[in-house]
Image: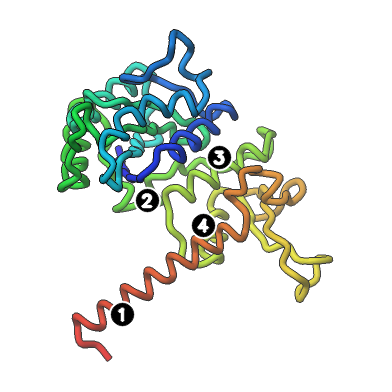
Amino acid sequence: MVAKITQAKAVGGMLQYNNKKLEKGEASILGYNKIITGGKDIEKLGITQTQKSFDSFGNLNKELKRKYIHVSLNPHPDEKLSDEKLTDIAKDYMKQLGYASQPYIIYKHTDIERTHLHIVSCNVKANGKTITDSNLFRRSNEIRKGIEKKYDLKEGAAKKNPIDYANTKKVDYKKGDNNAQIKTKALTILSLVKFSSFDSYKRHMANYNIAVDIRKEANHPDGKILGSTYQVTNDKGVGEGLAIKASHIDRGGNLDLKKLEKSLIIIKRINKSEKIFLKKICNLS
C-alpha cells in the first residue's frame, strides 16, 4: 500500500474534487465520522452542507494555515479488497494518525485500474487545539507498514519501482470500449510514473498497446500543434481502429497535451535543480 498526504487552508477544493468523482459514478463513500447529514444519504449532500461539518472544527482556530488534510491510500493493483476491508483499513489508519475524533469522509475511487481511497479530514480539534503535523510523513509511513502486516497487504513499493507497481495488462482492441480502456490505463500510469519527456511517456504507453502522437494542423509535419491522439495497437505496434483525440477520451482534460507538458516541465525543473545541488555538494564542474 502507498500512502500520500496533502494539507491545505481550505477544505472546499478537497470536497469538490471527490464530489466530481461521485457525480461521474467514479467514486463512492465507504464511511464517515462526525459529519452532520440530517438523516440524508451522505452521497446526496451538497458540498456546502458537507463543508459545514469540517468548518465547525476548522473555524475554531483562525491562525492555523493548514487546517485540512487529504489522504490517499493506494493498495497494490493486484489486491482486490472488499469495501468492508477497505473501510477497516481507512479507519485504522486515521485512528493511528490521531484523527479518530475528527470529522472525516472515506471515498473509494474507481476512476483508474487500481481502486484506491481518499480521506478528507480536519487538523483542528473540538477544543480548538491542533493535531501536530510534526514528523507527519514519517508517522504515516510507520502506520502504513503496520497496516500492511495487520491486513496482509503487499508492501508500498511504488516509489522503488513505480512501473512494476502499475498493472501491466495491455489494452485489447477486441474487447471494445477503447476510450475507457485507454483512459483507465493512461490515468493509472500517470498517477504512478513521472516522465521527463513526451517521448519517454510515448514509449512507455506503447508497452500497453497504446500509440500516443502529436496532432498537428492539417496533419502537416510543420503545422500548428493542436493536441494529442491515442490509438490502440496490436503487439507489433500496428494501429487498430482510428486515432482518438485526447479530449474525447477524457473530458476532464487530464490527458490534454498542455497539462502533460506542464507536468513534464516541472519534472525537468526538479531534475535540473537536483543536478545543480549535486554539483555543489560534490564540487563538480
The label shown at residue 184 is 3
Where does the image place residue 94, in percent across and percent down from the top left?
Answer: 24, 29
Quarter of the image holding residue 150?
top left
The answer for how far apart the CA atoms under marks 3 and 1 are is: 37 Å
Q: Is residue 285 left or right of residue 281?
A: right
Mark 3 vs mark 1: which is more N-terminal?
3
Q: Observer-nearest residue: 273 or 64?
A: 64
Where does the image place residue 182, in percent across and percent down from the top left?
Answer: 61, 43
The answer for how far apart the CA atoms under marks 2 and 1 are is: 25 Å
Mark 3 vs mark 4: which is more N-terminal?
3
> SS at mark 1?
helix
Where does the image place residue 174, in percent across and percent down from the top left?
Answer: 68, 36
Q: Residue at x 17, y 30 (%)?
A: 96
The label shown at residue 276 is 1
Coloring basis for residues: rainbow
Mark 2 vs mark 1: which is more N-terminal?
2
